Amino acid sequence: MGVGSNNDTISHREKWFKEQKSLAQLPVILIGFLLLLLTTRVVKETVKDHEKTWKKKMLIIGGMLILMLILFKGCM
């Protein structure tokens, strides 16, 4: 075992971890996309319903955006 073979195994491990990380991001991206669809649906529902106040609308939209940011932050 020389120094070169040790470096090769380290680079191989790094490559493997990068592949695993990119695979792990797929469900997170999918969940984020579904949240985006849900957000647009909630916004459409709240726009139809005029009884809700702007505060409630903004809290719902803000909450969804914060959830999406957390998901995409975990993705990186």
Image (spheres, rainbow, N blue to C red):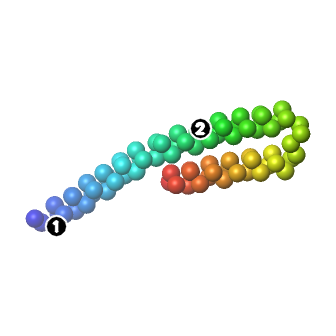
Q: Residues within 10 Å of mark 2 (few under 14, many from 20)?
A: few
Instruction: Inspect the image, locate mark 2, and give the three-letter code of the amino acid beneath it.
Output: Leu
* Residue type at the position of mark 1: Val
Q: Position of residue 10 (x, y in %)?
A: 25, 60
Q: Residue at x 73, y 51 (%)?
A: 62
The residue positioned 27% from the left and 56% from the top of the image is 13
Secondary element type, mark 2: helix
**Which quarter of the figure has residue 45?**
top right
In the rendered image of this protein, does residue 32 appear above or below residue 44?
below
Q: Which residue is mark 2?
A: 34
**Residue 9's image quarter?**
bottom left
Q: The N terminus is located in which quarter?
A: bottom left
Mark 2 vs 1: CB contact within 8 A: no
Residue at the (36%, 49%) spot, across then down: 20
Task: In the rendered view, tell whether residue 43 sits above or below residue 15.
Answer: above
Q: Residue furthest left?
A: 1
The residue shown at (65%, 36%) is: 37
Q: Check disc 1: other Cα within 10 Å, few if <14, some if 14-19, many if 20+.
A: few
Q: Which mark is residue 58?
A: none
Q: Nearer the viewer, residue 54 or 14?
A: 54
- Judging depth in this view, the residue of 35 and 6 nearest the camera is 35
Q: In the picture shown, does residue 71 fall above or below 46?
A: below
Tell me the element at label 1: helix
Distance of label 2 from label 1 (alpha carbons): 48 Å
- Answer left or right for 9 relative to 44: left
Q: How many marks?
A: 2
Q: Which residue is mark 1?
A: 3
